[in-house]
Amino acid sequence: MRRRLRALVAGLIALPLALAVAPSAHAADPTGMTSGFYVDPDSSAKRWAAANPGDGRAPAINSAIANTPMARWFGSWSGSIGTATGAYAGAADARDKLPVLVAYNIYNRDYCGGHSAGGASSASAYATWIAQFAGGIANRPAVVLLEPDSLGDYGCMTQAQIKERQGMLSGALDQFARQAPHTWVYLDAGNPGWASAATMAQRLNDAGLRQAHGFSLNISNYFTTAENTAYGNAVNSALSSRYGYTKPFVVDTSRNGNGSSGQWCNPPGRRTGTPTQLGGGAEMLLWIKTPGESDGNCGVGAGSTAGQFLPEVAYKMIYGY
């Protein structure tokens, strides 16, 4: 009940702001229904630290990374997806905390880049999967980042493939609107180095942004918070001038403490950024990519696979060298 009362008060306070942006299908504010963000008890960093208590790097990794609220990523590896998202959202709700989830299973995922290729076997299979994802969360409060890179990864796609992807994303947003009324969904908008703000505004709008709560920036990348804030504001300026609405945005700060070196795939010398919090130049600053998890077989992660936890990379990222 305490959470529900906070949500009602937060909703009344937020009414003037809501008039300035496009209405979302999700009226409830999950940040007002919870008391802080959920720390994933089974993150790759947590598992490594627990399995290697005698390693000299373990205390720093445990305190600086594993105990920071981070997103959990869900894909084909997650088993029965409705069961998986339901269990995760339920565990967070039992602790009065707000979970952050990433849906990462779109058909033809990373079609042009290839390092994280995979995803659902077809557009229809994805529609079933994402419906079960949303249904698992149900009425619990949550934040969902929808399909990182999906709107930046257009370079080698045909127009038919782009239209198909737009349909998958807009269909996903419809499922969350129907089944997960206390979830804020952010449609991913890449990063400042990928597409112009005007181009990204068009892609977001065409993929159904009006139905989403907002958009996300910098997932798994390294651009500074200031650079992302400027880009997010520029995207909103383009949305306003072309389509008549704006949206809130969030920034992945997990690895942007030293900014970008111009490389995106396991560059050396990066650093963890501002921990997960409300505000900070965006609606929220979130740790979406786990520091120390590989981007693929490249850079300082040579020989690794995407998503593999690399303790030496994590340790160096804490100190920025």
Image (cartoon, rainbow, N blue to C red):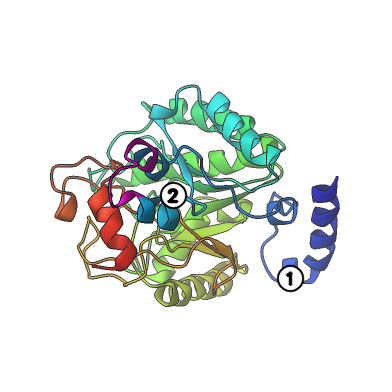
Report helix, strand or loop for mark 1. Answer: helix
Mark 2 residue crowding within 10 angstroms, few (<14) / some (14–19) / many (20+): many
Q: Is residue 6 left or right of residue 282?
A: right
Q: Is residue 39 left or right of residue 63?
A: right
Q: CA distance from mark 2 to mark 1?
A: 35 Å
Q: Nearer the viewer, residue 249 or 164?
A: 249
Q: Is residue 194 visible?
A: no
Q: Is residue 139 visible?
A: yes
Q: Are marks 2 and 1 in contact (CB under 8 Å)?
A: no
Q: Is residue 276 left or right of residue 16?
A: left
Seen as rendered, the residue at the extreme front is 54
Q: Amino acid at mark 1?
A: Leu
Tell whether position 56 is magenta: yes
Image quadrant in which the N terminus is located:
top right
Label 2, on which residue? Answer: 66
In the image, residue 289 lies at what x, y percent?
Answer: 39, 52
Label 1, on which residue? Answer: 17
Q: Nearer the viewer, residue 295 or 243?
A: 295
Q: Residue sitting at 22 percent across and 46 percent down?
A: 296
Please name the predominant secondary structure of the magenta segment in the image: loop
Tell whether position 92 is magenta: no
In the image, residue 294 lies at what x, y percent?
Answer: 26, 48
User: Mark on residue 46?
Assistant: none
Seen as rendered, the residue at the extreme top is 80
Q: Residue sitting at 43 percent across and 72 percent down?
A: 225
Q: Residue sitting at 56 percent across and 26 percent down?
A: 82
In the image, residue 67 lies at what x, y percent?
Answer: 49, 51
The magenta span reads 49-58
Q: Amino acid at mark 2?
A: Ala
